[in-house]
Image: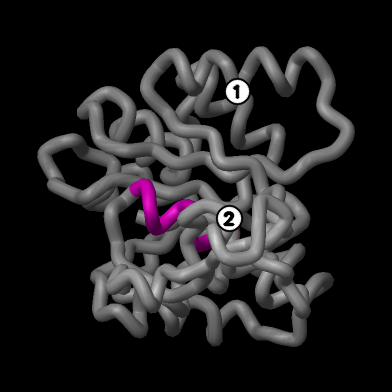
C-alpha cells in the first residue's frame, strides 16, 4: 500500500510507484486531497498520470475499501511523503480517512509501516508523534538523502530515500549503491560503492 499525503516532496511517492510498477509489484494507492494539490504545485504531472502508476487506486474517504480491513493481506504500507497532520493521525489512531485507516490496520496487524516525514524544522509535537509511531511498530525514514553516493541530480537524492524504503520491504533495486566501507587500496578517505559489483541487485 502506498499513501501519499499533502506534504511537500510528493515526488518521493511518485517515484516509489514508478519503481514498484517497473518491478511488477502490485500496489494500492491512496492520495489525500492535499497530495493531489501538492502534485500540481510541485510537478508537471497530472493526478491521473500518477494514479495510472498504481495497480489499484482507492478513494481517500472510502473507509469500506479492501485495505481498510486487516483481513485483506498486504506486505505493508509506505506513507510517502507524510505530512505532520497525517503523522498526527497515525500517532493517535484518528482514522477518519482511508489513508489513516490503512496505516492503523498495518500497525495493528504488525505489518511494516514506513513513514517518510517531510518537514523542517521539527517541533517537539512532531518529534513526539514520530516516537509514538515508532513505539507502535512503525519505521520512520526521514526524507534526508545521504551524500556518500555523491548524488549529481535531484533524482539521485530522491532515489536514495526511495531505495531506503524498498530496503525495508526487502524489495531488490538498483536505485543507489550500497556502502561496503572504504577501499583498502585508497585509504579511509575514499568510498567504495559496489552494490552492483558485489552481486547485490
Find out whether residue 177 is within the magenta segment: no
Which residue corresponds to the image point at 52% horizontal and 40% vertical from the top-left? 115
Q: Is residue 116 above or below residue 158?
A: above
The residue where tag 2 is placed is 182
Horizontal arrangement in the rendering, residue 30 relative to residue 14 (left or right): left
Q: Nearer the viewer, residue 17 or 104?
A: 17
Quadrant in which the N terminus is drawn: bottom left
Instruction: Identify the magenta region.
Output: 161-168
Residue tagged by mark 1? 130
Q: What is the quadrant of the C terminus in the image?
A: bottom left
Among numbered discs 1 and 2, the one appearing first in the sequence: 1
Q: Is 84 situated left or right of 27 in this image?
A: right
**For residue 37, above or below residue 201:** above
Q: Which one is in front, 9 or 197?
A: 197
Q: Is residue 41 left or right of residue 195?
A: right
Q: Secondary structure at mark 2?
A: loop
* Residue beneath the point at 43% across and 75% down: 174
Would residue 42 be seen by someone viewing this image from the given angle? yes
Amino acid at each position: 500500500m502506498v499513501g501519499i499525503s499533502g506534504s511537500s516532496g510528493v515526488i518521493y511517492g511518485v517515484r516509489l510507484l514508478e519503481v514498484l510498477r517497473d518491478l511488477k509489484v502490485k500496489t494500492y494507492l491512496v492520495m489525500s486531497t492535499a497530495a493531489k494539490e501538492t502534485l500540481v504545485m510541485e510537478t508537471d504531472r497530472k493526478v491521473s498520470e500518477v494514479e495510472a502508476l498504481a495497480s489499484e487506486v482507492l478513494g481517500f474517504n472510502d473507509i469500506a475499501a479492501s485495505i481498510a480491513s486487516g483481513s485483506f493481506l498486504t506486505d505493508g504500507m509506505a506513507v510517502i511523503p507524510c505530512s505532520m497532520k497525517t503523522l498526527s493521525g497515525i500517532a493517535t489512531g484518528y482514522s477518519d480517512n482511508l489513508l489513516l485507516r490503512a496505516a492503523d490496520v498495518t500497525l495493528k496487524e504488525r505489518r511494516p509501516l514506513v513513514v517518510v516525514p517531510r518537514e523542517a524544522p521539527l517541533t517537539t509535537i512532531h518529534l513526539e508523534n514520530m516516537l509514538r509511531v515508532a513505539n507502535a511498530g512503525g519505521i520512520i525514514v526521514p526524507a534526508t538523502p545521504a551524500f556518500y553516493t555523491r548524488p549529481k541530480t535531484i533524482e539521485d537524492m530522491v532515489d536514495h530515500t526511495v531505495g531506503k524504503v524498498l530496503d525495508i520491504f526487502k524489495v531488490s533495486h538498483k536505485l543507489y549503491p550500497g556502502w561496503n566501507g572504504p577501499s583498502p587500496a585508497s585509504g579511509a578517505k575514499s568510498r567504495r560503492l559496489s552494490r552492483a559489483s558485489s552481486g547485490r541487485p
